[in-house]
Image: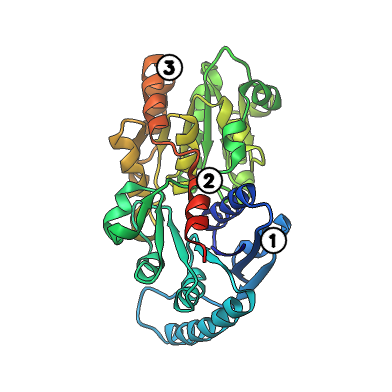
Amino acid sequence: MKVLVSGGGTGGHIYPALTIVEAIRDLDPAAEFLYVGTEQGLEKDIVPRENIPFVTMDLLGFERKLSLENLKRGYMAFKGLLKARNIVDNFKPNVAIGTGGYVCGPILFAASLMGVPTIIQEQNAVAGVTNKILAQVCNKIALGSLAAKSSFPAEKSVYTGNPIRKSVTQGKKDAALKTFGFTEDKPILLVTGGSRGAKSINTAMIDVVKAEAAKNRMQILLVTGKYTHDKIFTSIKNVVDNIEELSHIKIVPYLYNMPEALAMADLAVMRAGAIALAEIAAIGKPAILIPYPYATGNHQEANARDFVEKQAARMILDRDLSGENLHNYVEEIIFNDQLKTDMANNMKTLGKPEAAKDIAKLALSIAK
């Protein structure tokens, strides 16, 4: 069995692809893989570390306006389609899977035209442009959100949920408490804006940390992002001069053990990326969602609204975010055990922890 996989640009496209690869390997240990990405995306560094054969295509996404630059990118896309055809012809896959990003366009289009069964995996509530186009030629669409169903042909669409890493459901609270030096007697707030951080969330957290440093009613793990950590930490230190001595507040640039942090958290404050939401849904963690306002098609807000409607999360729009209203939302939830339980139960109903396996089975079922 040969499986062609493509997904690039951001971790939100790459990690689901790698999770699906792992699930297919579980079902068919002899399966062979080829991952197609770009030189510019994170996949160039991430995929080879997973011992998956990797090739690149020289592509750039189109600007959302008429421009001379788009003519250049259109020429690159044409060349990319020719290269994609060569990649498919040389590898001869039994099935091709795309998880998003503009690199998926030519490779899955070429595979479809050459008679290779294809699956696209749409993670968001608002379907991406590339996936909408590919839906016309692909065999199946694995939906991460039911809200995206109206964007695709019904006969091709299967609601699977979004694939998440196995480690997410394997985090242990006791081990996490030891790792971070927290205790059982106070609730734990996890705040993250992703690997690059979120300026608005970090800024609002300055006031929250200031208030809770003195009150010592909750434990806080703030993940600032690598690029903004020093600036935010300095800003917090200006208002809490003994911040380094406080055992109930930890401020870190990045987490390599996010599953552990999620396991111990009573409440998460985060953006509304599809994969991050799939992870907290799988383990039933209440959340305050602050959608990234510049996401394509405003899809993060659409993602978040689905969870808010199910009473699994609260939402604060980025333009409305302040230290005061974030602190108010946190206080409303984190000290109310019944509300936390209700939100956690509602969150868990949205979880699809077997999504990767279901997508893997779908791929194998249509493989040529």
Observer able to see residue 191: yes
Instruction: Classify 70 as above or below 267.
Output: below
Mark toward the start of the polypeptide (3 vs 2): 3
Instruction: Classify 239 as above or below 81.
Output: above
Instruction: Classify 328 as above or below 294.
Output: above
- Provide residue 302's location: percent of width, then percent of height: 32, 49
- In this view, the residue in front, 298 or 201, is 298
- Name the image quarter holding residue 155: bottom left
Give the spatial CA distance, label 3 vs label 2. 37 Å
Q: Hey, what amino acid is under mark 3?
A: Phe
**Tag nearer the camera, 1 or 2:** 2
- Provide residue 224's location: percent of width, then percent of height: 58, 42
Give the spatial CA distance, label 3 vs label 1. 46 Å
Q: Which residue is mark 1?
A: 52
Residue projecting furthest to the top? 185
- Provide residue 186's location: percent of width, then percent of height: 54, 15
Q: Residue at x 35, y 33 (%)?
A: 314
Q: Which residue is mark 2?
A: 357
Q: Which residue is mark 3?
A: 335
Instruction: Classify 117 as above or below 51.
Output: below
Q: Hey, what amino acid is under mark 1?
A: Ile
Q: Residues within 10 Å of mark 2 (few under 14, many from 20)?
A: many
